[in-house]
Image (spheres, coloured by chain):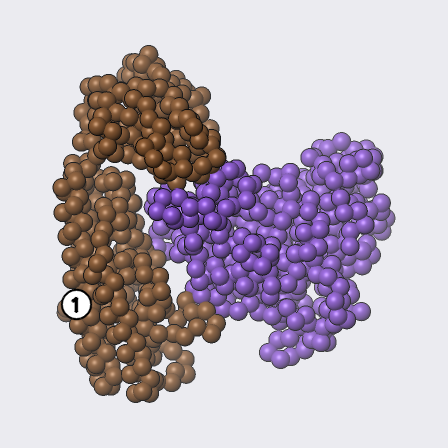
Chain colours: A purple, B brown
Amino acid sequence: MHPDPSSAPDLAVPDHDAATVLEASAPTRQASQSGVSRRGLLGVAGAGAVGVGAGLASGLGIGTRESSAAQPAADVQSYPFYGEHQAGIVTPAQDRLHFAAFDMVSEDRADLISLLQDWTAAAARMTQGRDAGPFGATSGPYDAPPDDTGEALGLPPSKLTITFGLGPSLFRLAGQDRYGIAERQPAALRRLPHFPGDNLDADRSDGDLCIQACSDDPQVAVHAVRNLARIAFGRAALRWSQLGFGRTSSTSTTQATARNLFGFKDGTMNLKAEEPSLLEQHVWVPAGNARESWLTGGSYLVARRINMTIETWDRQPLREQERVIGRSKAEGAPLSGGGEFSQPDFHLTGSGEQPLIASNAHVRLTHPDNNGGAQMLRRGYNFVDGSNGLGRMDAGLFFLAYVKDPRTHYIPVQTKIARGDGLSEYLQHTGSGLFAVPPGAASGGYVGQALFA
Amino acid sequence: MTGHHADRTVRSPRRTGLALLSVCAVLSVPLLSACTENVQASSGPDGNPRAMSVQATDAGCTVSTDTAPSGNLTFSVTNGGSKVTEFYLLASDGLRILGEVENIGPGLSRDLVLTAPPGSYFTACKPGMVGDGIRSAFAVSDSGEALTPAGTDSQLVETANKNYAAYVKDQTEQLVSKTDAFTAAYVAGDVAKARALYPETRVHWERIETVAESFGDLDPKMDLREADLEPGQKWTGWHRIEKDLWPARAKGYTALTKAERKTYAADLVKNTATLESKVRTLTFTADQIANGSRGLLDEVATGKVTGEEEYWSRTDLWDFQANVDGARVGFEGLRPVLKQQDASLDTEIDEGFTSLQKLLDQHRSGDGFVSYDKLTKAEVKSLSDAVNALAEPLSRLTAAVV
């Protein structure tokens, strides 16, 4: 699928880019009265001086791409929106998240298509540090509300990515085919089954559509979802949303492994952008039958809101915490020894002939070797949504994982975790969603276009 | 005070000498002399004479110093070898173990923290976890500080263990006989009697819940809640019967037939008998009792105070009390040991139990408790706060008595 398997897919900047195209037909930020240009504040070499196109992903000049395509630039500020795959999947995980699920309020197919077109155009602009609409936050008719809400003025693109997904209910809601797409619903796109211990809140689950906005600046991520929700009014309405304040996964070898709210490194074994053949094997939907061809090169997004009883966890002895995870808290090394990236030895025993990695340790149950080789690309975020009325934090991990087929890559693993993982004692799943994530759009096209062809 | 982890200025998983030095640098004047003394006596890697590093390999066991002042000692053991290793501090007879850390995988580090009075000792690494280990002499000088006794009084611990085993056995026996009465009423269709016996009987289960749960296969058969089922799994045990007795919250529920009731009842009776036979020969250690005590409070925090455990019958407060009973019995048994080791922790835990019990007593009704539904949000919150207040010091019990 990748023309150049050594390149990090999201960073393979096409020679043309979205912003250039839009720039030609829309009033530019420079023309605005405010004089504040978000793009002008990129603060990286090349921005503004070389021109609009080069200002995007300015760390990735053409020369850079040719000389070291596999190396993500350290100072990249924005990622291209258009491309083979949607950005925000293998893109190095940004620090903050705003995730939102929507339900369609219109039953008109044309409304769904126009919504996806409008979302695509706005996302293409915002990910490049531009305003949501062509006029921007501070220009346009004086008697009209601005077409951008304005809170991102003066902020750099902050690595914003916007990733769109389609839920099972979009294809079929209570047997109804509202948009003439039911026959193209992939077999794998079904509501996830009930897993042992699930305590799902309907107001934090499912949805016809979803948006994952990731950025290093929380205000930029919120700005994106807010403006996309505004664009959707009358066609789709916000169903639920979730903020994440800290990444718990690294999706690139250039990133250090982050820690979750249990205080342990999370996602040591995660799939990485630098592993294109593994991504083909585990993340991207391969070409298949005609019914599902619109999803080729896309992926499935599993979203789970997982509450952690952190107060109880914090009272566990270090011995118990490490036993439950199966790794050391300091380095994240498997208890069988080595360093963080050493492979665990599940057979090595210690005193009393007991395995050093307990039979119900999280690392044992989730390891690909014990799951038919299945791997996920995880992109989760820590959350704290205030407190819960019991004097405790409403805290946890908003789990996001991209897989090529949830039936082989998520459901069996989660069934196992829910049933036998020592960690489950400290977890409660309170929200759930499964979405098909279409491949990336080409410039001039829109996300999900092939579904309506 | 010396080398307290929380004082480190840089968050690093392993302590650094730099951070400890900075602690001394920012200490106020009255404590300065203490710092100076420590630095003069320093021989440890961090400038803290009570913090030793141990480099364990397959053939060596290098301790950063062979002497330390009496008090709270920390040995930070790093396994640089290829075998799983253990580290011990042994008394001068080379037999009595003051403390140990085991199962240190190659490349991993682990701390041994203990209190050592003045005297002669041996350090020992045991690569491969076999043999006498690689030993060196280790001397603890008299720092003049008052110390808690070294190690725990084995006589007291043994008594605690015996008493706890007897308690678990007794509760299980009561569970057996009450389960017989409960299931008989249930099968006979005497709903009122079965409902009355349900929480009374479960009290004996909940008091020893952490022990019962240790039998991995038995617990799901006996105590699984409906939400914990996986697709296709058959639901049996207490809560299956509970739903049948209190179907009010179930939508479109079909009552079980007499034959079905008989089946579920017989299954519960059989599993209870199995539990009893397994418990009969159980023995306990101090850390198991202490962890079990904490574990019972965890159960309260996750399932009872939230009203999730008894979803159908709303008898959560009975379970709440029973968990607290069990936790308290574990604690009381260990108190003679704890009083020697850490009298202030003993007081703190004792007060926590007392406050929590006072709150629980406000919700008594007859021989039992009011329905969970009757609690206001504020009452649930204050119960939860009391559980947290107790659970926090209780979580330090294990380290204090082992």
> Is residue B306 or residue A367 the one in the foreground?
A367
| Residue B182 in view here | yes
Q: Is residue B336 visible?
A: no
**Residue type marked 1:** Gln
For residue B248, side relative to residue A154 (left or right): left
Secondary element under disc 1, as helix, strand or loop, is helix
Q: Nearer the viewer, residue B307 or A317?
A: A317
The residue positioned 39% from the left and 71% from the top of the image is B226
Left or right for A142, reference B86 = right
Screen quadrant of the N terminus of chain B: top left
Query: Residue A92 or A139: which is nearer the viewer?
Result: A92
Near-viewer residue (B43 or A237): B43
Specify the farthest residue to the front.
B131
The x and y percentages for residue B310 are 31, 68
Question: What is the x, y in percent for residue A312?
Answer: 36, 50
Q: What residue appears at the point 62 percent right and 52 percent down from the top-left corner?
A: A377
Q: In the rendering, at what x and y percent does residue A389 appear?
A: 37, 56
The C terminus of chain B: image quadrant: top left
